[in-house]
Amino acid sequence: SESSGGGSSGATAGGGRKGGGGKGKRPEDARVDLHVLAEDAFGKVSAAVKGELQVVSNEYQVLGRMNAAAAVKYGEMGEVVAGLGVFMHSLRQKDESLAPFLAQLEDIDAQVATLEGVVAALDKHTGALEGRFKRLVTPPEDTWG
């Protein structure tokens, strides 16, 4: 059997002493002590469980706030992506509208290269003609004289 605790007389809860006097009172005192201890234990367990539940509740609140913040951030990112999509569409339209002009520029560049070749050939031919002209215009030196 368990002792009655509390330092009363050292008797056991089951009535360890045989004798008169307080035989009916001791088990009652033990029940009251046991009841008080049980209430105290249940109160402490209840407080511990409430504390754990409060921790879990706080964690869920933090997670809820984090989810709300993430939802806001994802919403902002969605708006940015939508804006980039519109911008990209606009750039594609501009690229398509500029494509004929770019093709014309490439054609002009090819024509300029051809003209540069013609100019180089004309320059060479002009140099040759100038040389012939100078020989024809300048009188020959008198070698007899």
Image (cartoon, rainbow, N blue to C red):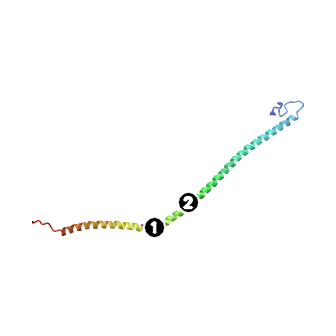
Task: Examine the image and state in which quarter residue 80 appears.
Answer: bottom right
Label 2's element?
helix
Q: Is residue 115 above or below residue 1?
A: below
| Residue 6 rendering spot, x and y as whole percentages | 81, 33
* In the displayed structure image, the side of residue 125 where residue 36 appears, left or right: right
Point out the image quarter for the C terminus. Answer: bottom left
Q: Residue at x 61, y 54 (%)?
A: 70
Point out the image quarter for the N terminus. Answer: top right
User: Which secondary structure dominates the residues rendered in magenta?
Assistant: helix
Q: Residue at x 19, y 67 (%)?
A: 135
Q: Residue at x 30, y 67 (%)?
A: 119
Q: 35 and 19: which one is in front?
A: 35
Task: Examine the image and state in which quarter residue 129 appears.
Answer: bottom left
Q: Which residues are magenta?
A: 94-102
Q: Amino acid at mark 2?
A: Val
Residue identifier under label 1: 98
Q: Is residue 120 above or below residue 30?
A: below
Q: Is residue 45 above or below residue 16?
A: below
Whether residue 116 is in magenta: the answer is no
N-terminal-most mark, 1 or 2:
2
Residue identifier under label 2: 81
| Residue 109 rendering spot, x and y as whole percentages | 37, 66
Farthest residue toward the right? 20
